[in-house]
Amino acid sequence: MSLDRKKVLNTSLAAGLILILAGITYPAFAQKKFLERIRKHYLLGQETGKCLLCHAPKEKEEPGKKNLNVYGKALQADPDMKIALGKEGEYKFTEAELAAFEKAVINIECLDSDGDGATNREELDLGTFPGDPASKPDPKKLEEYRKAKAKK
């Protein structure tokens, strides 16, 4: 095989690998702005402000459209999310799309998406995951939270 032919083959293989890696990792890029927005809105830390808010990936699986948890599905189903759906790759979301996402998050605050007895808002404020029924606020903390909210 000639040197030029080897260069072309190596370049083609490298380009193919890059495309495959980009395809595998794109969900992490696509919704990063959503995660940043929800972290800021609820002042979430690193422990709760992560992809597991909306996704339930299996082992060695990246968060993506196919593994949304019940909270992620509720967000996706909210009518305000419509303009922000269907974007792929490293799409740069507009401020209007990010605002629509934030509005959808607020719209579903009063729901208990995972059916664990705490609303989505309560879970976000108390550091648990609204899409995971096994992750629920401590009952005493939840009661105190509700009493404090009722006084306002």
Image (cartoon, helix red, strand yellow):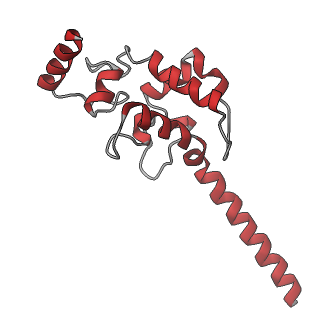
The image quarter in which residue 151 lies: top left
| Figure label count | 0
The image quarter in which residue 19 lies: bottom right
The reply to whether residue 61 is visible in this rendering is yes
What is the residue that sits farthest to the front in this orientation?
A: 152
What is the residue that sits farthest to the left in this orientation?
A: 140
Left-right relation of 39 to 115: right
Q: Residue at x 24, y 28 (%)?
A: 136
- Nearest to the observer: residue 111 or residue 40: 40
Residue 17 at x, y percent in the picture: 68, 65
Residue 123 at x, y percent in the picture: 30, 26
- Nearest to the observer: residue 54 or residue 45: 45
Q: Quadrant of the C terminus?
A: top left
- Nearest to the observer: residue 69 or residue 146: 146
Q: Residue at x 54, y 43 (%)?
A: 32
* Relative vertical location of residue 34 with respect to residue 80 in this rendering, above or below: below
